[in-house]
Image: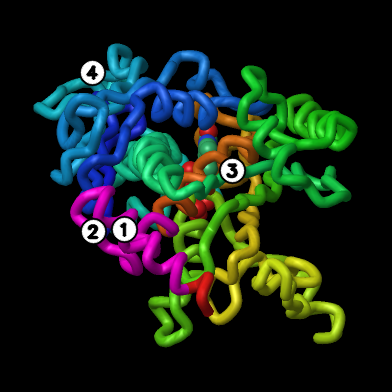
Amino acid sequence: MLRFETAGESHGECLVATLTGVPSGVPISLDAVNRELWRRQQGFGRGGRMKIETDTAELVAGVRHSQSIGSPIAIIIRNADWKNWTEPMSVTDFEGSDEKKKKVLRPRPGHADLAGMIKYNYHDARYILERASARETTARVAVGAIAKQFLGQFGIEVLSHVIAVGTATLDRPAQWEELVALSKKDEVLLGCVDAEAEQRMKAVVDEAYRTGDTVGGVFEVVAHGLPVGLGSHIAWDTRLDGRLAQAIVSMQAVKGVEVGLAEEGAHSFGSKVQDTIHYDKDKRSFYRGANRAGGLEGGITNGQDLFVRGFLKPISTLRRPLESVDIVTRDAEKAAYERSDVAVVPAAGVIGEAMVAIVLAQAFLEKFGGDSLMETRRNYDGYLEQVREF
Ligand SMILES: Cc1cc2nc3c(=O)[nH]c(=O)nc-3n(C[C@H](O)[C@H](O)[C@H](O)COP(=O)(O)O)c2cc1C
């Protein structure tokens, strides 16, 4: 079984991840991991933190001579900002003023601050926000980069793009080739495939900057090259749509997920929604009249591109803070402000790719198994043969 865990605080020494269950013999490129980390840091609307950090991963276990060896893969990503936080984030005792300890006493509406303080019995939101922070997703993206490299061995690719920032939307479908081109860019504005729509999105972020506000949006993750048959209809927790939804909504600030064109479908008649079934007798293969289901039926991949969308709420740290209460005095105060992002939709898309890649790699290994890549490939090829003969 493929499983992973992450640890690490936003201003702690480093982020750590372990990934267990990758078969041996998978080519692993550290450059590819670092490229994904770079992509996660991009986009117009990011805060000062992303200028401090240039994330690079260290693979400290489970990889030898650029190949997985079957044992747990361990990854470390050091926080460049740590040097400024060694005292407030010290593992050992540190005596100092509230300011020196960088206490956060005025919880931010929308963040984990207040609920976390009450739950973990701390009168300082620093204890909560350090882990609630989406900096944790750096570790997820590193893990996802390895899942992507595994899937890549079978011709499966996972990419994303931005379809809305606040009220500005992409009003046409995107082609797979456009997503590929987008992923290769070395400058990222808002991760939209359409230059005109991207400028409208930028205007929304500009407005948020001007007014001390923040803005959310929608990203779409697409998986290309999937076989029919990942996931299963047989139980609630084997349905791939449910597993993808959990993975996407587990992301910080993501409050909704859409599988295929779910929202449009809910407002339409069935005759306009289902993807008709056809058969090409020459090619001896089934094909569909459309792909509104997002490549999933009954929680099983149906061989079409898989697409899911994540709906991000606006970032909760505002430069013009909202009303809150001081946790010590209980007086009405404005919420705390700490250097923060204004819009993060392209970065969220990259994190979404990682989450989708991890879930797909899990489902793939459940179906095809194998302790070595060679064994997984043999199983996979046997299945493809079976599907061809179907
Ligand atoms: C890529 C990314 C970057 C984020 N950056 C910030 C940030 O700079 N400031 C902030 O307050 N929230 C940020 N968030 C959102 C918070 O982490 C999130 O709102 C918080 O943990 C509370 O969780 P919830 O919104 O899922 O309920 C970011 C989220 C993502 C996906």
Q: In this view, does 37 lie to the left or right of 374?
A: right
Pointer 3: residues within 10 angstroms few (<14), some, or many (20+)? Answer: many
The alpha-carbon separation of the residues under discs 2 and 3 comes to 26 Å
Q: Which numbered marker is on residue 378? A: 1
The alpha-carbon separation of the residues under discs 4 and 3 comes to 37 Å
Give the number of the mark in front: 1 or 2.
Answer: 1
Pointer 4: residues within 10 angstroms few (<14), some, or many (20+)? Answer: some
The residue that disc 2 covers is 370
Mark closer to the chain start, 1 or 2 = 2
Q: From the viewer's side, name the closer residue of 294 and 253.
A: 294
The residue sitting at 44% across, 58% down in the picture is 360
Give the number of the mark in front: 4 or 1.
Answer: 1
Q: Is residue 263 left or right of residue 62?
A: right
The alpha-carbon separation of the residues under discs 1 and 2 comes to 9 Å
The residue that disc 3 covers is 159
The residue that disc 4 covers is 86
